[in-house]
Amino acid sequence: MSAVPLTVVAPEALPVPPILGGAVQTWIAELAPRIAARHPVTVVSPAHPDLPATETDAAGVRHVRVRPHGPRAVLPRVVPDRDAWRFRLAGEAHLHAARAALRGTHGAVLVGNRAAFVPRLRALAPAARVLLRLDNLPLRDFDALARADAVLACSDFVARAARAAAPEAHALGVANGVDTERLRPADPARRAAARAALGLSDGPVVLFVGRFVEDKGVHLLLEAVPQVLAAHPAARFVLCGSAHFGLASATDYERAVQARAEALGPAVTLAGFVPPARMADYWAAADVFCAPAVWAEPFGLVYLESMASGVPCVGTRRGGIPEVVQDGETGLLLAGDPGPDAVAGALKRLLGDARLRERLGAAGRRRVLERFTWDTMADRVEHVLAA
């Protein structure tokens, strides 16, 4: 295959590499160096004070980080949060700032999770194929979906939704991956060291990782805590996350979660937003991961991280989660609309059966190695580039 120049456009909120987190930013950061081994790659993302405006990293990926200026930078901040235009204006400001890096690009342009960018990118780079990475629901900009040369959805579930919304869209599932070297099952010494570093005792540890928004179901986990403690008094619950990656003040929902957690006493630890680079200790310390999503999760990268770490999952049978977690084989999946009793039941079952945890954790690790490595994901993207 001849080299195809690839320009990857990140969304407007978070930089690449993902020093502030973000599933799309992580996907781009893992994709770029693997593709750069065979094709020239440029990544365009928002500026951040800890990152240079331009650089070429060790893998040969060229980074261009842009910051909106003038009225385009100010207007999105003065539009009320509740107004959908704020989201669109921020995207427009980001693209306007990036126009010099994008104009006249050839080869392929891959935009991360912003269908609305597709028509603008076609105008800026008419000689390039425009590919759309689609990670989120609900879908918007249906006409733009059909205008992309290919829609690389994070799951078959999202690909089906894209084709239903825009029948002319060429949508296919290209799953997320996970770093299986950084995240791996912890031996007893590693587990003990991680727990000591986090101030945790030898009791069982239930971990939640995700945004503190209602969709993720952290409130259900907290409602289940008293039942779990009645059966396993030494259990501890560690909640990693915030509403906005630690970038904004707490929402009403986040404050309600914090109040509920504090009312449960020392059994619950609120770790706040934890940068991805610091998450390895939390995975090493965990016995069970629980994220009882109450919406149609498009994919669920955090379940992959749990499985790569050899930690059995408790999730829900919604959206793309069943494509990741196999019920009874790599974790336990609850009914699509679970209550706290169901969450507590699954946790009590796992915490009470070390052999079951070991079996599910080992099977989860094998499944990740077979199907969900970043190398596998990059191979699928390169296949699309060659089409």
Image: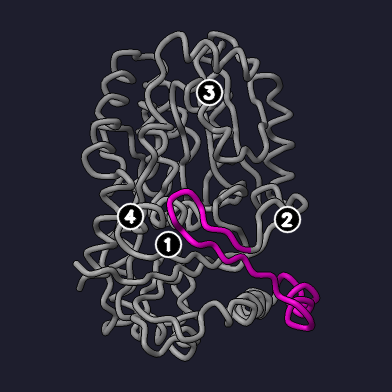
Q: Is residue 65 visible?
A: yes
Of the two numbered discs 2 and 1 on the same chain, state the one appearing first in sequence. 2
Q: Which residue is mark 1?
A: 135
The magenta span reads: 54-82
- In the picture, residue 143 is in which quadrant? bottom left
Marks 4 and 1, Cα distance to the nearest angstrom? 25 Å
Marks 1 and 3, Cα distance to the nearest angstrom? 35 Å
**Which amino acid is tagged 3?**
Gln
Of the two numbered discs 4 and 3 on the same chain, state the one appearing first in sequence. 4
Of the two numbered discs 4 and 1 on the same chain, state the one appearing first in sequence. 4
Marks 2 and 4, Cα distance to the nearest angstrom? 28 Å
Q: Which residue is mark 2?
A: 49
Marks 2 and 1, Cα distance to the nearest angstrom? 27 Å
**Badge 2 element:** loop
Check whether the beta carbons of the residues at disc 1 and disc 3 lie within 8 A of each other: no
**Badge 3 element:** helix
Which residue is located at x 25 percent, y 68 percent?
384
Which residue is located at x 44 percent, y 56 percent?
60
Marks 4 and 3, Cα distance to the nearest angstrom? 51 Å
Estimate the x, y position of residue 276 in percent, counting from the top left.
55, 40
Which residue is located at x 54 percent, y 33 percent?
279
Residue 37's label in the rendered image is: 4
**Which amino acid is tagged 4?**
Ala
**Badge 4 element:** loop
Q: Give whichever of 36, 193 is nearer the camera.
A: 36
**Badge 1 element:** loop
Q: Which residue is mark 3?
A: 227
Q: Give whichever of 104, 142 is nearer the camera.
A: 104
**Which amino acid is tagged 1?**
Asp
As drawn, is 256 to the left or to the right of 146?
A: right
